[in-house]
Amino acid sequence: MNNYEIIEKLKDIISQEFPDRIVYEKDVAKALGMSKESFSHFKKRESVPVEQIAYFCAKRKISINWILFDQMPKSLEEETEKYTHIKYFSKINAGAGGGAIQ
C-alpha cells in the first residue's frame, strides 16, 4: 500500500471514533501522537511512521498488517511456503578465500 492509502485507512478508523465530524490529516497526526509538522515531514519523504502506527493499532486492537499491507489477520494463520528455516550454528568458522581475481 502507498502512503495515501495508509493515511485514508487511518482516517476511516478515526472517523468511526468521531462520526459527527470530518477527519483531517491533523487528526491523524494527533491520533498517532505526532505533531502536524512531523507527520507532514513523513509524508514529504514518502515514508510511514511505523512505530507510531504500531502503537495506534495496539491501542485499538487492530492488526498492523491490515493497515500497512491490507492483509487480513485470518490469512496469517495459513501456512506458506514462501519462507524457509535456516539452522543457526554458533560455533563454526568459515572463509571464502582471499577474493583474488584470476
Image (cartoon, rainbow, N blue to C red):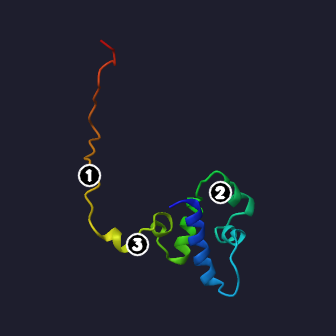
Q: Are marks 1 and 2 in contact (CB under 8 Å)?
A: no
Question: Which residue is depicted at the point 56% across and 68% down?
Answer: 55
Tell me: 87 left or right of 74: left
Quarter of the picture holding the C terminus:
top left
Disc 1 is placed on an element classified as loop
Q: Quadrant of residue 60?
A: bottom right
Q: Position of residue 12 (x, y in %)?
A: 59, 77
Secondary element under disc 3, as helix, strand or loop, is loop
**What is the crowding at mark 2: few (fewer than 14 residues within 10 Å), some, or many (at least 20)?**
some
Number of other residues with Cα within 10 Å of mark 1, as a class: few under 14, some 14 to 19, many 20 or more: few
Which of the 4 image quarters holds residue 22?
bottom right
Q: Give whichever of discs 3 and 1 has the lower sequence position.
A: 3
Q: CA distance from mark 3 to mark 2?
A: 25 Å
Q: Please report whichever mark, 1 or 2, sits nearer to the chain's N-terminal start.
A: 2
Residue corresponding to mark 2: 43
Give the residue drawn at x 28%, y 31%.
Answer: 93
- The residue mark sitting in front, 3 or 1, is 3
- Vertical arrangement, residue 91 with respect to residue 73, above or below: above
Query: Gap in Å between the C-alphas at discs 3 and 1?
Result: 22 Å
- Mark number for residue 94? none
Amino acid type, residue under disc 1 in the picture: Thr
Residue 65 located left or right of residue 45: left
For disc 1, the marked residue is: 84
Q: Secondary structure under badge 2?
A: helix
What residue is disc 3 on?
72
First along the sequence among labels 3 and 2:
2
Q: Amino acid at mark 3?
A: Met
Label 1 to label 2, Cα distance in Å?
35 Å
Is residue 56 placed above or below 85 in the rendered structure?
Answer: below
